[in-house]
Amino acid sequence: MFSLHWGRVKKVINVRSHKWILLVDVDGKDERAVLYPRLTGEVKKGDYVLLNTTAVELKLGTGGYHFVLVVDGGEEKTQSLPGHIMKLRYTPYQIKVLAREEKRNFADHSHPIVIAILLHSMLPAVACILKYHEENRVAFVMTDGGALPLWFSDTVYKLEKRGMIQTTITTGHSFGGREEAVNIYSGLLTAAETCNVIIAGPGPGHVGTNNKWGFTGLQQGEILNAAGTLGYQGIGIPRISFADKRKRHYGISHHSITSLGKVCRDRVKIFLPQLAENKNMIIREQAKALKDKEIIFLETEGMMPVLEQNRDIMSTMGRELSDDPEYFLTCAAGGLGAAKLAKGGEKNN
């Protein structure tokens, strides 16, 4: 079920508070590894570490990293922090967190806008546009559809540093947010206590198969259903690309048609960018599958310069901003639509 190898730390390449990148000698070969010091303790040059090497051996999209399970000779740890909710339950790594539900009842008086993203790579473009409208306070609510530790996301780290996200909440079995929540409902309620716009979706890395139902990104539809249940305005962002030559991902991805057209039951808003007419025709035809949603086209003028200022965090499937502009403009349109709703510029259903 998994592959384990011992390695010896040659160098600590990068240190962030909750995520370290190591260079490790594994059977005479230099390999990169991720260490979460809050789970394993810290390391230094020369330490031996037990690595989970499964994803690299399968050539999966972890960025080529192994993950440190155990530090040989590491100190025993006693968890003294409060909380009684377990995440990663009944696994060797089950951890205790203080969930928001344990603190006090929710005061459900606000009605934030919830932007549900399909992929983690959508997050920067949405957040950049919202930051441009600085009156918004933005939360990122992370599901357990991708990476489970929020600490793995360099994107979230940079967005927080740049003031584009004000708080983070991790739900389900994901962990490491400024607040922890048991599920998407309580995660959204937690975010609504301090923010008027919520971006919700997976962390880096998702599971996809050739089956349209075998995709963790379908949580997007579930997020929007939860938002509707709580009385919040939902916005769905489809995956649109004209750089991906695979037919099922050309224009509006089949994953978005499934997530927004079949899983999502609410009449949510979908903001789309005005593109070249030949591309608009393709999008309009494909969008007929989303006939019960409110489709709103927005002018993209002025969006690209804002994205360009943060091009270092714009990447999807190995493609940068200039390689796949329609993808990022679609995300930006969702952010702009949310900003308009928050300001009262679009009717809020």
Image (tube, grey):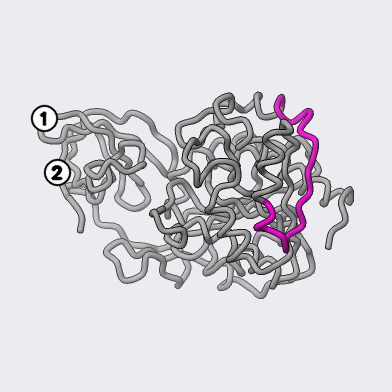
Q: Determine the image quadrant of residue 156.
A: top right
Badge number at residue 28: 1
Q: Residue at x 15, y 35 (%)?
A: 26
Q: Which residue range is magenta in the image?
A: 287-305
Q: Quadrant of residue 349?
A: bottom right
Residue 292 among magenta residues: yes
Q: Residue at x 38, y 63 (%)?
A: 95
Residue 293 lies within the magenta run: yes
Q: Is residue 245 left or right of residue 269?
A: left
Q: Amino acid at mark 1?
A: Gly
Q: Residue furthest bottom?
A: 105
> Looking at the image, is mark 1 or mark 2 earlier in the sequence?
2
| Location of residue 157 in the rendering, given as x and y in whole percent from the top left corner | 53, 39
Give SS at disc 1.
Answer: loop
Which mark is on residue 6?
2
CA distance for labels 1 and 2 = 11 Å
Give the residue drawn at x 59%, y 56%: 257
x and y percentages locating residue 7 in the rendered image = 16, 39
Vertically, is 86 above or below 243? below
Are the residues tagged 1 and 2 within 8 Å (C-beta)? no
Residue 320 numbered mark, or none: none
Q: Amino acid at mark 2?
A: Trp
Which quarter shows the N terminus? bottom left
